[in-house]
Image (spheres, helix red, strand yellow):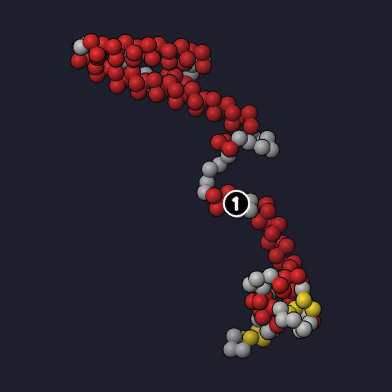
Amino acid sequence: MAKIKARDLRGKKKEELLKQLDDLKVELSQLRVAKVTGGAASKLSKIRVVRKSIARVLTVINQTQKENLRKFYKGKKYKPLDLRPKKTRAMRRRLNKHEEGLRVAASIKHTNWLVVLCVCGVSTNRAGEGLAWPWSWLPGAGWMSACLRSVSRPGLGPARF
């Protein structure tokens, strides 16, 4: 049997591909028997070609199956895990573009509100100085209060928001 081309297989239907796969597997088993019984060298070299042909048929079957699944799930809310983009773990956990835009808008509003609080002298991180806001008890929030308390930073000029 001559080497099978993948482009020839792509036009065939699944039933034809499965039949061809069975034929190739039968041929491979016959070639292996011939190898044990002391067959000709041409049959021994044909084992590799048949194995690769089986792999090609299986590859085409799997690719067409996955392509059909992609068409089926296109536009649906949920997709199987193997049809989703792989990327990296960190990239999958990032916000998408729409959510990022929302976050940026919310961040701008939040910063503007903090500037108002700073000018009014409300924002603080120390007990007894002004009003304790919800973010003041968060770890690492000290920088926010320190930044907002100093509208004019020594040596660095006025704070920019």
Q: How many marks?
A: 1
Residue visible at 58% across and 26% down in the picture: 68
Q: Is residue 112 visible?
A: no
- Asked whether, in this view, residue 91 is left or right of residue 2, the answer is right
Rendered view: 81 above or below 19: below
Q: Is residue 14 left or right of residue 153?
A: left
Q: Residue at x 65, y 84 (%)?
A: 158
Q: Residue 66's quadrant in the figure? A: top right
**Image location (x, y in percent) of residue 9:** 44, 19
* Quadrant location, the C terminus: bottom right
Q: Nearer the viewer, residue 90 or 110?
A: 90
In this rendering, position of residue 59 left or right of residue 2: right
Q: Look at the picture and state if 158 lies above or below 62.
A: below
x then y, percent, for residue 65: 54, 25
Residue 146 coordinates in the image, percent (x, y) = 67, 80
Sort mark 1 into few (<14), some (14-19) or many (20+) by Cα contacts within 10 Å: few
Q: Position of residue 53 (x, y in %)?
A: 37, 20
Which residue is nearer to you in this view: 153 or 23? 23
Label 1: which residue?
A: 93
Give the quarter of the figure containing the N terminus: top left
User: Which residue: 69% across, 70% down?
Assistant: 138
Quadrant of the rendered image containing residue 81: top right
